[in-house]
Image (cartoon, rainbow, N blue to C red):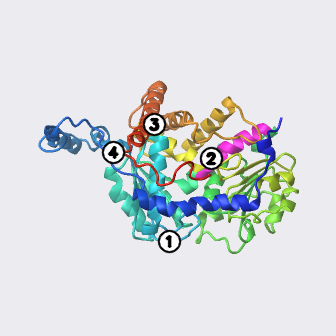
Amino acid sequence: MVSKKEESKPTVEELLSKAKKPAQLAPAMHKFYEGKVQLMPKCSIGSTDDFAIWYSPGVAAPCKEIQANPDKSFELTNRWNYVAVVTDGTRVLGLGDIGPEAAMPVMEGKALLFKYLGGVDAFPICVKTKDPTEIVHACELLEPSFGGINLEDIQKPKCFDVLEKARAQLKIPVWHDDQQGTATVILAGLINSFKIVGKKPRESLITLVGSGAANIRTAYVLMMWGIKPGNIIIVDSKGIVHLDRKDITKEENPWKYDLAIKTNIEERTGDISEAFKGADAVVAASKPGPDTIRKSWIKTMADNAVLFACANPIPEIWPWEAEAAGARIVATGRSDFANQVNNSLGFPAIFRGVLDVKARTVTDDMCIAAAQELAKFAEERGIHEKDILPRMEEWQVFPREAVACALKSIEQGVARVKPSRQELFQRASAIIQNARQSTELLMKYDLIKPPPFKGDLLK
């Protein structure tokens, strides 16, 4: 039975009003709190005498141990749980190149999600350079202080180069959330979507609309998972990606050029409408709509079609319009619609997992392990057309996802320590619960001030 809530659809004006409300409230809220994250002690301080242990003279002893074995920094300091969120501010959300200072609120927000959802202590690092070599070098300089690096909001195509070089040169996990985080959650959603519609994904035709960081990495992750490369069609602003296009060169964008070779076995050409024909699933990570994708294109897709319209704040097409055109499953990037595809389901737990084994890197195989666990969690508690992924409030998914990534790290031989599955689960659960409960206690005792607005801020 369909509920009245499901039947009543908000008007475009109501949706636009709701979409604008966070931006209207955000400046005042940011000014009120003067930022979103802070440092807090984690060791016991009975009196100032204890500083003789935590600082001079006692601190010299752990310093000497780390000098003899630098890996001891993961045991004797909080390095094991520190992540640097690094950006040059060249592609911040939908704002573009706004500079490192203006990127700071976003990086702080990322750090907040890291802590609350994954128990990870993340630090915003906004660098004053646009040079990819200097960004990589900055990560190298930071490496002794951190257990991982999260690259964020770096424009393409240099974001691919920065990720590859930093991964190769650092001995800690380096991750680009716009690439790997998006790809992880998209794969999880597709796994369950194909189960619901009764299709075999490895035999299905998948179109990716947009050839930015998100969909380029999604293409590679899908292929690594088992999708036939030839069954993937990529569309950019100039139409379908194919090898005969003179504007796609190895020198300018080797990653898109490589995909032009591997994908599109039918050798389709033409505009975006041609890429929809017969597609079993379309994943759009392109410009905000609501008219970026047209109903007439969706009508040409295969039966039981799946559509992910991931642009924010307005998806490439309204979900109800996509459904009216024939899409059986529709997902967006918004929390107020069914089936939100949200990176926050990925990066906090994935880093929790690789940090807990003190991993030397994070791989796309770990993205796949995380995606499979996300899909499995949702399937176990029940999935249907309007509910294909876990939700952020289902915090129990994060320890499970962390364990999946940690075990994959151990399997791939990049973990510095090798706890058991049970030990990993207990550790991740305890750390994540501690972060959530600490925040609740700080709010309860007004150590985090109540907001200047009463009630639910977004209603």
Circle nearer the N terminus (2, 1): 1
Residue closest to the far left: 57
Badge 2 is on which residue?
Answer: 185
Residue under circle 3?
432
Q: Amino acid at mark 3?
A: Ile
First in sequence: mark 3 or mark 1?
1
Residue closer to the observer: 411 or 184: 184
Asked if the residue under mark 2 is in contact with the one under mark 3, i.e. CB atoms within 8 Å, the reply is no
| Camera-nearest residue between 172 and 266 | 172
Q: Nearer the viewer, mark 2 or mark 1?
A: 1
Provide the residue designation for mark 4. Answer: 79
The CA distance from mark 3 to mark 1 is: 33 Å
| Viewer-side label of 3, 2 | 3
- Where residue 267 sits: x, y (%)? 80, 62
Which element type, helix, strand or loop, lies under badge 4?
Answer: helix
Residue under the image location 59 percent in, 72 percent down: 252
Residue occupied by mark 1:
98
